[in-house]
Image (cartoon, rainbow, N blue to C red):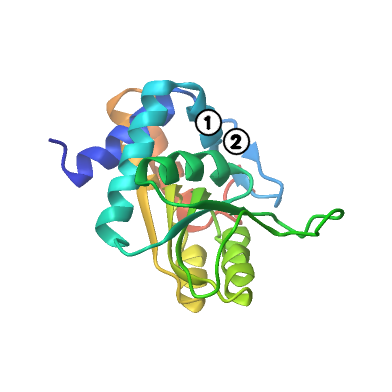
Amino acid sequence: MLNQQDITKRIAELLLEAKAIKLSPDKPFQWSSGWLSPIYCDNRVALSYPDTRTFIKKTLAALIKKEYPDVQAVVGVATGGIAQGALVADLLELPFAYVRPEPKKHGMGNQIEGRLEKGQSVIIIEDLISTGGSSLKVVDVLREAEIEVAGMVAIFTYGFAVAENNFREKNVKLSTVSNYNALIETALEHNYIDSSQLESLSAWRVAPETWGRNQ
């Protein structure tokens, strides 16, 4: 049986194998925010690989049962958390809903899609945590609807200090099944990167907003 550290690294390995996560410290990507980044992460790619998808689903479900045993529904964050959330909700035999970035512009004008009841305790599922800004907007929507947010679980987090502060300010517990430190360690072990790139990769996580500007 894998321990928690092994699980964290195994998920990082699976994401690298699926090319859901790509590392390119020498030719960085540019995010929509304008930040330069040595990493590109799209965990939706993992859905195309049944074994990877199943391992992640079971790991998220086990985490929820351990950390949030009393939740009554699962809520996905659109769009990356919808499929993952539905898979986990099915495994846990819980109701599922998801939250749009903004209310629908026609029909009923829903922002929460699915049926949730006032006072219901829910766990939010997200695929990736960067600064936490867009993810935490879902918390605001749910709380405004008088839904009780037990916490949020995600596949992967970069571990930025700004994200930790944002979650703390909103009083939201965040749990993840893999993270940037595990990714870098795993990438080095499996030769996705070499030791000469470690310093740059570590520096990016500390100051992503300025990293690469003088390269």
In screen coordinates, is 17 left or right of 8? right
Mark 1: amino acid: Ser
Q: Residue at image x 36%, y 23%?
A: 51
Q: Residue at image x 70%, y 56%?
A: 101
Quarter holding the N terminus is top left
What residue sits right under mark 2 in the picture? Answer: 28
Question: Where's residue 200, x and y in %?
Answer: 46, 43
Q: Residue at image x 42%, y 22%?
A: 50
In screen coordinates, is 195 left or right of 124? left
Q: Can residue 105 be seen from the camera position used here? A: yes
What residue sits right under mark 1 in the picture? Answer: 24
What is the quadrant of residue 69 in the picture? bottom left
Number of marks drawn: 2
Question: Where's residue 48, x and y in %?
Answer: 51, 22
Question: Where's residue 27, x and y in %?
Answer: 59, 31
Q: Which residue sits furthest right? A: 106
Q: Residue at image x 80%, y 58%?
A: 108
Image: 191 above or below 156: above
> Is disc 1 in contact with disc 2, using a CB cutoff of under 8 Å?
yes
Mark 2: amino acid: Pro
What is the quadrant of residue 131 in the picture? bottom right
